[in-house]
Amino acid sequence: MGMHKYQKYRVGVSAILVLCALASPLQAAEEVNIYSARKEDLIKPLLDKFTGTTGIKVNLVTGKEDALLERLKNEGRNSPADLLLTSDAGRLHRAQEAGVLAPVNSAVLNALVPANYRDPQGHWFGLSVRARPIAYVTERVHANELSSYEALADPKWKGRICIRSSDNIYNQSLVASMIAHSDVAATETWAKGLVANFARPPVGGDRDQVLAAAAGQCDVVVINTYYLAAMLNDEDSAQREAAQKLKVFWPNQQDRGAHVNVSGIGVTVAARHRDNAVKLIEFLASDEAQAWYAEVNHEYPIRANIAMSKTLTGFGTFKSDSLGLHQLGQYNAEAVRLMDRAGWK
Amino acid sequence: MNSIPITHQLHSAQHWNLKPGWRTAIVLVALVVAMPILTVFGFLLQPATDVWQHLAHTSLPDYVVNSLLLMLGVGVGTLLLGVSTAWVSATCEFPGRRVFEWALLLPMAMPAYIIAYTYTGLFDFAGPVQSALRELTGWGYGDYWFPNIRSLPGAIIMLSLVLYPYVYLLARAAFLEQSVCVLEVSRTLGATPMHTFLRVALPMARPAIIAGLLLALMETLADYGTVQYFGISTFTTGIFRTWFGLGDAVAAAQLSALLMVFVFVLIMLERWSRRAARYHETGQRKRSLPRHRLTGWRMAVGFALCLTPLLFGFVLPAGQLLVWAMRTAPNVVDASFLRLTLNSLSLAGSAALVTLAVGLFMAYGRRLHGDRTVQFAVRVAGLGYAIPGTVIAVGVMIPFAWLDNALDTWMRAQFGWSSGLLLSGTLIALLFAYMVRFLAVALQTVEAGLGKIRPSMDDAARVLGHSPSQVLKRVHMPILRGSLITAMLLVFVDVLKELPATLVLRPFNFNTLAVRTYELAADERLADAASASLTIVLAGIIPVILLSRSITHARSRHE
C-alpha cells in the first residue's frame, strides 16, 4: 500500500516537472504582443516573416481601432499590449492624446520613416501610405474636366458623384485635411455643394462606389486606391471589368497635392517587451516589408525606391499632401460635425 | 371544468416565504450581471457635453425616427411571418409540413449582416439581377424603377427574414401546447376557424408571441452591421458615430443608456398591458389537436406561406454564399479553419450553458420571490440584448479592468508583487459578456416555460410535503425541459453569430468564424468571406434541427 502511494507521489512530481519543463521555454521565449486594427490577412504574413528571422513570437489581437484603444486605456499599466497598430493616422493621434503611447527614439526608424509620416516625438510611425484620389468613368468623363476635390462641388457634377458614408474614417480624414488647409466655413460650403451632387445617398464601401460608377449610376467617385487595385486583380471577372472602366485622377496637383493617410504603429506605455516592439517596427519599415505592402495590398510604401505592384505603377506618380498627419486627428471631430450639418449621411 | 385562461387575482398571496439567503443571492447575481449595464448607465451622471446640442440640431431626429420605423417594420414583419407560419404548421396538415416545421427555423442561423451582403450582391444596381435586366431591355441607369435593397424598407425585410424565427419558435410552441378543449369549445360555440384563431388561440399565445417579438425587436435595436451597410442612420449607428467620429465616449454611452431606458419602458408597458392577467390553462386533458387537412387552394396558400420566408430567409442567401464559397474556398479554407470552427463551437457551447444556468436561477427566483426589488433586478439584468455588442463589451471591460488593476495595486503595495490582469483579456471576460448580452434570450424562454406551471401545482406539491427543491426536481423540471433546451440552443446560435464583443474582448491569437467573416467582409471581400459565413450557418443548423426535434418530442409526450 505504502509503496503504491509513494509511486503515485513520484508520478505526480514527475508530471509537475515535465509540465514545468514544457512551460518554461514558453515563458523564456522572446515575444511581443500587438493590438492591430489591420485585419489578420493584411499583417499576419509579415509577422510570420518577422518571427522567422528573429525568433520572436508575435501574439496578435485584431479589432476596430477605437475599441482596441478603449481596451488599452482600461487595461492601463498592466496591459499586455506592447504595440498598437491602426489603419489611419487620426486614431494614432487619438491614442497619443489618451496617453497610451510612449515615445521611441530610434535612429533606424528616423532614417527609414520620412518625417511627415511619423510623430515628431516618436509616439507613432507610419507604415504604409493610403491615397484617396478621384476616379472617373473614362466613357463619360474626360480627365481635363477634373481638377481638385474642391471642384467636385461644382454644379456641373450634379447627380454624378458616388462616395461612401461620412461614418467612414477615410472621408472624415479627407474633410479634416481640407479644414486644416482652409477653415470650417469654407469646407462646410464645399461639403454642401458635394452632397448636392451625390448620385445617391451614400451606401456601401469603396468597392461599391466603383461598381455603381461602372454600372452607370454615377461618373465620378472618391476612393482609396488599394480597393480599385484589388478589384483590378480580383478573380471575379465582374469586379475586374467594372474597375477597368475607371481611371485614377490625382487631384490638387497644382496646389497641396492628393490626400493621403497612413497605417501606422506605436509602442504602448505599458510595453513589457519594448525592445522587441521597436525591432518589429523597424522590420515593418524595412525594404522587405514595404515591398510586401506595395505588392500584396497595393498600398504605397513610405519611401520612394521600393518596388510596387504593376497596378500601382499603372496609377501613375502623384504629388501627395504633405500636411502633418496628426492634424487629421485634431480636426476629426470638427469634420464629422461639419458633415452632419452638410447632410452627408 | 374546461380549460380557459383565468385571471388569478390572488397571485401575490401564493408566494412561499423563501429563506432570505436565496433572495439576497438572486439580487446579488442580478447585480453582477447588470454590472456592465450599470456601468453604461453611470455615464448618465456625467455632465452632458456640447455634442448633445450638435446632435439635437443635426442627426438625432434622424436616429430616433429611423430606429422607430425600423422597429415598427420589423415588428410587423416578424409577427406576420412568425405567427402565420406557426399557426399553419402547428394546426394544419399539408404536403411538406413536417419539413417546414424545422426548416422554418433555419433563417435564424443566418447572421443579419450576411443576408444583407448577399442580397446587395444579388439585387443591387450593379448586381447580376439588374445587370441582366438591363442587358435584356437595353435600359440604362434611370430608365426603369427597381426596388432599392439598400434602404430602410430593405433593412426591414432583411431583419424580418432572419428574426421571425424567434416569434415562430415561441408562438408555435404555445399553439402546440394549447389544450384542444379550449379550441373545441370555441368551435362548438359556433366560431369559424378564423375566429377561433383570432379570439381564442391568439390571445392565449400572446405572452409567448410577445416574448418572441421582444427578442426580435431588441436584436433589431442592437443591430449595427445591417443598417451601417445600408447607410441608414439609426440610434446604434449614431452611438458609434458619436464615439468613433466625434470622439465623445461619454455622449456615446449616454446615448446607449437612453436606448436601454427606452427598451425598459417598452418591456414595462407590455407587462402593464397584461396587468394581473395570467395565462395558465386549468384543464388536465392535453390531447393532441387533430390537424386540419388543407386541400385545394388552401393547401397552396399554406404551402406558399411557409415556403416564402424559408426561400428568402435561407435558401436564396445560402445559395449565393455557396456559389461564392465554391469559387473562393480553395484559397481561404486551410488548416486554421478547423481551429476557427472549434473555437466558435466551444465558445458558443460554454456560453449557452453559463447563460442558461444564470437565466434559470433568476427566472426561477423571480417566480418564487417576485417582490419589487427582485423583479426590477431581473428586468435590468435582461436589458443587455438591446445593446450593441461593442457597448456591452466596453461595459464589461471597464469594471473588469478596474478590478484587476485595483487588486494589482494592492498586491504591489502589500507584497511587492504584481498580479497583472487576471480577468481582462481572458475567455472568462468574453463568456461573461456573452452572458450579459444574451441573458434576455434565456430569461424570456425559461419564463415562457415557467408560465406553463400553474401556481396550483406548486401548492399541491407543497401541501403534499415536498420542499421547494423537490418541487423543482419532481414537478418543474420535467415540464421545463423543452424550454431549457430551447433557451440553450438559442443562446448557442446567437453566440455563434456574435461579432462585436468577440472582436474587442478576445485573448491573443484567438479567432472565431464570425471574426474571420467580418475581417474579410470589412475588406469588401464578400466572396472570400463566404466560406466562413457558410460554416457559421451550417454549425447553426445542427442546433436548429435539434431544437425542432425537441419541440416535436415534447409535444408527442403529451399525446
Image (cartoon, rainbow, N blue to C red):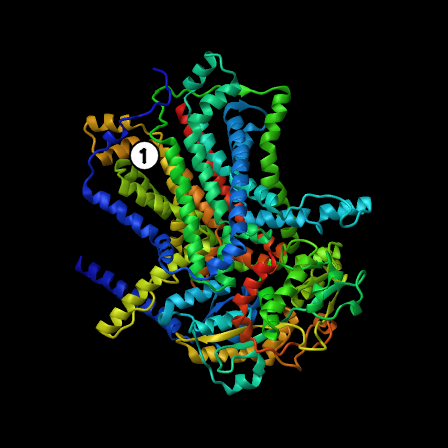
Measuring 48% from the left and 35% from the top, which residue is drawn there?
Answer: B167
| Relative vertical location of residue B322 with respect to residue B475 in this rendering, above or below | below
The residue at 46%/76% (across/down) is A267
Q: For residue A272, what is the image quadrant?
A: bottom left
- For the N terminus of chain A, give its image quadrant: bottom left
Where's residue B188, x and y in %?
46, 12
Whether residue B509 is visible here, answered yes or no, is no
Circle 1: element type: helix
Q: Nearer the viewer, residue B430 or B171?
A: B171
* Residue furthest left as drawn: A2
Residue B423, position in %: x, y? 34, 61
Q: Quadrant of residue B373?
A: top left
Q: Position of residue A85 (x, y in %)?
A: 51, 71
Disc 1 is attached to a residue of which chain? B
Using the image as rendered, state which of residue B117 and residue B76 is in the foreground.
B76
Residue with the mark numbered 1: B477
The quarter holding residue B153 reads: top right
Query: Seen in the image, is B103 located left or right of residue B471?
Result: right
Where is the C terminus of chain A found, in terms of image quarters?
A: bottom right
- The answer to whether one can see residue B257 in this image is yes
Kindly identify the amino acid type of the residue bearing the numbered disc 1. Answer: Met
Q: Residue furthest bottom?
A: A107
B544 vs A153, left or right, is left
